[in-house]
Amino acid sequence: MINPERIVLGRFDLEHRRIEIYQLAGGSTTSVRLRRIAPEPAVDLGYINRIGSPFSRLHLYRAEWPTELRRAAKSKATAIWHHAARHEAEVEG
């Protein structure tokens, strides 16, 4: 089985982490995935579904982040998603 192409929307720093926001080609345009790319090794952190709606929610796979860190990650990821939707370009944040 071939893995779907990742479409990188942008990246941002959160404390010591460098996080990449991406979507899967052919997947939902109202969800994004979060992947920590630094420090190594790269690891998928989770996803936000229904992004852009009042019902969006950040789902983390393994990380236990305090509420404020979760809010910051969701806010930055949502801002990148909005920017990419408007400009269809990768964002460095």
Image (cartoon, helix red, strand yellow):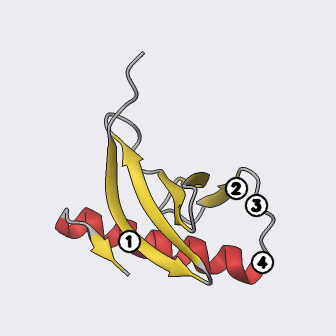
Q: Which residue is identified by label 1?
A: 80
Q: Residue 39, percent across and down?
A: 57, 68
Element assignment for label 3: loop
- Whether residue 67 sits left or right of residue 70 in the image: it is right
Estimate the spatial distance between the alpha carbons at disc 3 and disc 1, rounded to whole Å: 21 Å
- The answer to whether the residues at label 1 and label 4 have Cβ atoms under 8 Å apart is no
Residue type of the residue flagged with mark 2: Leu
Question: Is residue 29 visible from the viewing direction of this image?
Answer: no
Q: Secondary structure at mark 4?
A: helix
Label 1 sits on a secondary structure element that is: helix
Report the quarter where the C terminus lies.
Answer: bottom left
Which of the labelled discs sits on residue 54, or is there none? none
Which residue in the protein does label 4 denote? 67
| Quarter location, residue 71 | bottom right
Rendered residue at 73%/83% (across/down): 68
Residue to which mark 2 is pinned = 60
The percent position of residue 8, horizontal first and vertical second, equals 33, 56
Circle 3: residue type: Ala
